[in-house]
Each structure stands twice: as C-alpha cells, then as structure tokens.
Amino acid sequence: MVSFLKKLFSHPEPAKPKKQYPPSRSQYSDCKLLGLTIEPGMGYYYVKQMIEEALQKPQLKTIMDTNIAKRNAIYEQEEREEYGDALVDELKKWEKICDIDGQYLVIYKKGKTLSSDIVQFDGAQIETTTKKPYVKIEASLPKVFRGNGAPYIDWDKDTTFRPKQILEVKKLKKPINDNVELYDQILAKAKKLEAKYL
C-alpha cells in the first residue's frame, strides 16, 4: 500500500535534455554569407533551423545557390587537374542520372554474368582506393518477397557498378513501387533485350 501511494504522489523525473552540439564551421560560414548572427549559446540544430528559414527568402536563396555553384566549380576544376577530363566527364554524366528521381531498367554484366533488373541510382563518385581511380555508381535493387500473404518489394539490396558494366539504361515511365506484377512484366521484357548482348 505504501509503495502504491509513493508511486501515486511521486513526481516523474524530468526528461534529460538532448545533448547540445555547437554550430559547425560550415554553419558559421553560411551565416556570414547570409548576414545572420550566431549568438552565444545557440546550438547546431537551432542554427540549422535559422539557416533553413532564411533560405525561404528568394534573395538569400539566390546568394546561397550562387555560392554553392562557385564552390562546385572550384572543386570540379581540382578534380579535373587530379583525375583528368575523361574521368570527371564520366562522373558528371552519372551524377546527372543519379540526381533524377526515378527508377531505371538496367542491363548489366558483372564478370561473365549478364543480368537485368530495375535499379534506383543513389549516387556516383570517383573511387580512389584502387591503383587506377574509376567512377563508382551506387544503387539499390529490389528484393521481391513471395512468401505467405501478398507479395511485396523491398529496396534493401545495395550494390555498385562501374560504368563499363552497364550495357543499357532505360528510365521507367513510372516507378514500380510495390507492384510485383508490374515488376515481373518489365523483367520479362528485359530478358528479351538481353539477347542482343549474348
């Protein structure tokens, strides 16, 4: 009884405040560019919100976009000097594809195995861990579950490609989402397209 009354009338312990992180160097740089002031005591997330709200103003967004474009141009020039135009041009080609939302029918060959699947491209970068740098394309593949209940698709199969492994890329008119029937139909057509690469 006593323990019950203690629970009834006791006050819950106050929730521990979330750890406060200081603003980052890039945030200080962005705030200086946008004319914002970081006051003492402001944390990372507060400053992040302040910058996001400021960028709702078209004039400030234009300033930020212009600055980002300049930084990207400098970075690209440095890449070209280090890796050469051919590799960077290939990177830019795949970055453009990866930046477009959508799904693609891809026919590819890894080793001696010819395959086709529906792919979501996640990003492209220059891989420098090998003796000869190359463009690495990161992507997700669908995994179809056909067990008990209605079949469904999960995009949890991560993979990478080299550009030379990709033989054909066709953007789907609409994403398959969780439509297993549509997925099967597209793959059946893809198998016919594979024939010209055999």
Image (cartoon, helix red, strand yellow):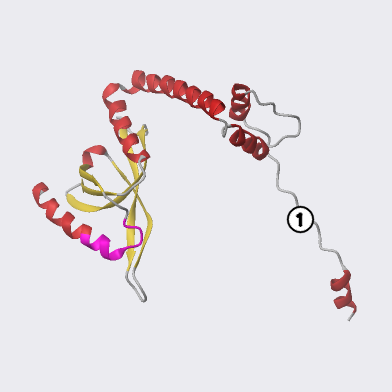
Residue located at (25% from left, 38% from top) = 163
Span highlighted in magenta in the image: 176-185
Horizontal and vertical percent position of residue 54: 61, 32
Judged from this view, the residue extending furthest toward the bottom is: 1
Disc 1, SS: loop
Q: Is residue 15 left or right of residue 116?
A: right
- Above or below, comparing residue 6 to residue 82 in the picture: below
Horizontal and vertical percent position of residue 80: 34, 21
Judged from this view, the residue extending furthest toward the right is: 2
Front-lying residue, 9 or 132:
9
Q: Is residue 124 left or right of residue 46?
A: left
- Above or below, comparing residue 77 to residue 198 in the picture: above
| Main SS category, magenta section | helix
- Above or below, comparing residue 22 to residue 168 in the picture: above
Q: Please tell me how many numbered marks the rendered image carries.
A: 1
Residue located at (63% from left, 22% from top) = 32
Tell me which corner region of the image, top left, top right, bottom left or bottom right, holds residue 101. Answer: top left
Q: Please tell me how crowded label 1 is: few (under 14), some (14-19), or many (20+) other residues with Cα within 10 Å.
A: few
Question: Split into 4 quadrants, where in the image is the N terminus?
Answer: bottom right
Instruction: Examine the structure image and report whether residue 182 is included in the region drawn in magenta.
Output: yes
Residue located at (49% from left, 27% from top) = 65
Horizontal and vertical percent position of residue 34: 60, 24
Q: In this view, does 45 lie to the left or right of 180?
A: right
The residue singled out by tag 1 in the image is 15
Q: What residue type is labelled 1?
A: Ala
Instruction: Examine the structure image and report whether residue 150 is included in the region drawn in magenta.
Output: no
Tell me which corner region of the image, top left, top right, bottom left or bottom right, holds residue 132. Answer: top left
